[in-house]
Image: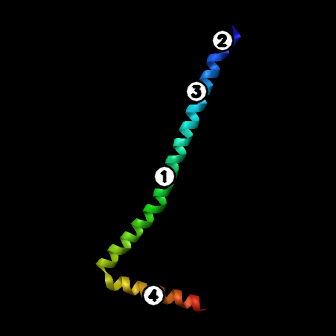
């Protein structure tokens, strides 16, 4: 009698562990996709905003580029 009562528990635990490992694999895959999205998308958005700003105010964008170039060149030289 004790063997019949243990068998359903073993079957359930094997099914649960299989389901949990499958769910874990799916969760890992979704997490990796989300991580790639959140790393790539903000950079594209930031450069898109800069590009739009440069189209709207080219003189200000040119002065910023000149100033940053001057600062970086000065720091690399010294």
Residue, disc 1: 33
Q: For the point 54% across and 91% down, which residue is it? A: 74
Q: Earlier in the sequence, mark 2 or mark 4?
A: 2
Q: How many marks?
A: 4
| Label 4 with label 1: CB-CB less than 8 Å | no
Q: CA distance from mark 4 to mark 1?
A: 38 Å
In what quadrant of the picture does the C terminus appear? bottom right
Percent of width and height locating residue 14: 62, 27
Quadrant of res 8: top right
Residue, disc 2: 4
Quick one: 56 or 10, which is closer to the camera? 10
In what quadrant of the picture does the N terminus appear? top right
Indicate the secondary structure of the residue bearing disc 2: helix
Residue, disc 4: 67
Q: CA distance from mark 2 to mark 3?
A: 17 Å
Looking at the image, residue 40 sits to the left or right of residue 59; the answer is: right
Q: Using the image, determine if residue 45 lies above or below residue 34.
A: below
Indicate the secondary structure of the residue bearing disc 3: helix
């Amino acid at each position: 009698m004790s063997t019949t009562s243990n068998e359903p528990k073993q079957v359930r635990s094997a099914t649960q562990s299989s389901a949990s490992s499958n769910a874990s694999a799916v969760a890992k895959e979704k997490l990796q996709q989300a991580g790639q999205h959140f790393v790539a998308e903000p950079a594209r958005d930031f450069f898109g905003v800069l590009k739009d700003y440069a189209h709207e105010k080219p003189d200000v964008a040119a002065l910023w580029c000149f100033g940053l170039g001057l600062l970086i060149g000065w720091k690399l030289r010294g």
